[in-house]
Image (spheres, rainbow, N blue to C red):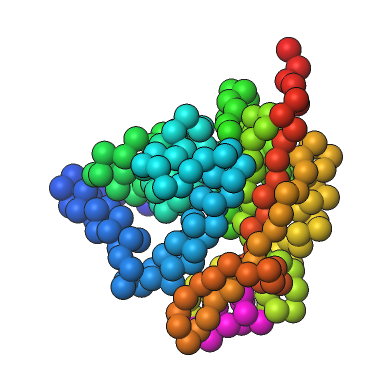
C-alpha cells in the first residue's frame, strides 16, 4: 500500500518570494486594459459608472467632489479581485468585499495594499455577515446570482444586510433568447471572451423574477438599466434594453426597523 506520509516529505518547498511574485503578476494582469481580461475591464468600467451615478442620486451626493461617498458603508458580495471595491473606496466609501474564493481575496488584498486603499476583504459568504448583524448603506451583488443554486436565499441575505434607506444593486443576465445567443454562444463559443461553460442559461434571472424575490423582503425596485456591447468599437454602453445584461436598483424603506 502506498504510504502517503512518505510522499508528503518530498513536496517541493514553497519559495515565499515566488509566491508573492505570482500573485503580484496576477493582480496586475487583472487590471491591464490591454491584457487577456480587457473585455472584463471594459465591461466593469461601464458598469462602475452606472453604479456610481445611482449611488450619488440615491444619497444626494456630488460626483464632482473628491470623496463623494464619504461616510457611506458599502458591501460587495462576490467582489472577485476588487474591480468595483477599489474605485468606490477611493471615493470615500467604507468598503467591505467578500468572496467565496480565497484566491480572489488574496489577489484583491495584495492589489489594494500596494496602493494603500483601505478595504476590508474577507473570505466569507453573505450568511456569515448576516449572523453578525452587520448593516450597510449600499450592497452590490454583481454577476453572482446566476451562479447560485438558491437564488431567493441570496437575495434575502442581501436584504437582511441592507440598512433602512439603503440601496441594493443587483447585476446579472436576463433569461431571453438574446442572452443565450449573445451571452453564451457569442461570448463563450465564438468570441471566447469567457471560458466555455461559464454560464448556464437556465440559471439566468429575469428582472420580474428578481423583483418578485425582493418584494417579500420589503424592498422596492427603483429602476433597471441594460448593458450592451458593440463588437465593432469594443465598447459597452448603458441602454434601456435589458434583454441581455442588466442592473436592477432597489431600496429598503427608511422607516424599516430591526427587531430587538
Q: In this view, does 201 lie to the left or right of 1?
A: right
| Magenta highlight range | 181-191
Q: Quadrant of residue 258?
A: top right
5 drawn magenta = no
Residue 149 seen: no
Residue drawn at point x = 52 percent, y = 40 percent: 61
**Location of residue 59 in the rendering, given as x and y in whole percent from the top left corner:** 58, 38
Q: Quadrant of residue 180?
A: bottom right
Q: Is residue 219 left or right of residue 34?
A: right
Q: In which quarter of the image is residue 216?
A: top right
Q: Is residue 172 left or right of residue 120?
A: right
Residue drawn at point x = 49 percent, y = 63 percent: 46
Dominant secondary structure, magenta:
helix
**Location of residue 88 in the rendering, given as x and y in whole percent from the top left corner:** 43, 45
Up-down: is 242 above or below 217? below
Q: How many labels does the image show?
A: 0
Residue 235 seen: yes
Up-down: is 89 above or below 38? above
**Location of residue 192 in the rendering, given as x and y in whole percent from the top left corner:** 48, 80
**Location of residue 45 in the rendering, given as x and y in whole percent from the top left corner:** 45, 62
Up-down: is 194 above or below 92? below
> As drawn, which residue projects farthest toward the top?
260
Q: Which of 177 and 236 is in front in this view?
A: 236
Residue drawn at point x = 39 percent, y = 46 percent: 86
Give the quarter of the figure containing the C terminus: top right
Up-down: is 165 above or below 229? above
Amino acid at each position: 500500500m502506498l504510504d502517503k506520509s512518505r510522499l508528503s516529505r518530498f513536496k517541493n518547498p514553497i519559495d515565499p518570494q515566488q509566491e508573492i511574485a505570482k500573485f503580484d503578476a496576477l493582480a496586475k494582469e487583472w487590471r491591464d486594459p490591454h491584457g487577456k481580461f480587457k473585455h472584463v475591464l471594459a465591461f466593469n468600467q461601464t458598469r462602475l459608472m452606472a453604479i456610481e451615478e445611482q449611488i450619488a442620486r440615491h444619497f444626494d451626493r456630488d460626483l464632482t467632489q473628491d470623496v463623494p461617498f464619504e461616510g457611506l458603508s458599502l458591501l460587495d458580495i462576490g467582489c472577485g479581485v476588487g474591480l468595483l471595491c477599489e474605485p468606490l473606496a477611493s471615493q470615500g466609501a467604507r468598503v467591505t468585499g467578500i468572496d467565496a474564493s480565497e484566491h480572489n481575496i488574496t489577489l484583491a488584498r495584495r492589489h489594494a495594499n500596494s496602493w494603500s486603499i483601505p478595504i476590508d476583504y474577507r473570505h466569507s459568504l453573505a450568511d456569515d455577515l448576516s449572523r453578525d448583524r452587520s448593516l450597510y448603506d449600499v450592497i452590490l451583488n454583481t454577476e453572482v446570482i446566476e451562479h447560485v443554486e438558491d437564488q431567493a436565499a441570496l437575495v434575502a441575505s442581501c436584504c437582511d444586510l441592507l440598512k433602512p434607506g439603503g440601496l441594493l444593486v443587483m447585476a446579472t443576465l436576463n433569461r431571453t433568447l438574446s442572452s443565450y445567443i449573445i451571452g453564451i454562444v457569442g461570448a463563450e463559443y465564438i468570441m471566447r471572451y469567457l471560458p466555455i461553460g461559464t454560464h448556464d442559461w437556465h440559471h439566468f434571472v429575469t428582472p420580474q423574477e428578481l423583483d418578485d424575490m425582493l418584494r417579500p423582503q420589503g424592498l422596492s425596485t427603483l429602476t433597471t438599466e441594460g448593458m450592451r456591447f458593440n463588437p465593432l468599437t469594443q465598447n459597452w454602453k448603458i441602454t434601456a434594453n435589458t434583454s441581455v445584461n442588466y442592473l436592477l436598483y432597489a431600496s429598503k424603506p427608511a422607516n424599516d426597523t430591526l427587531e430587538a
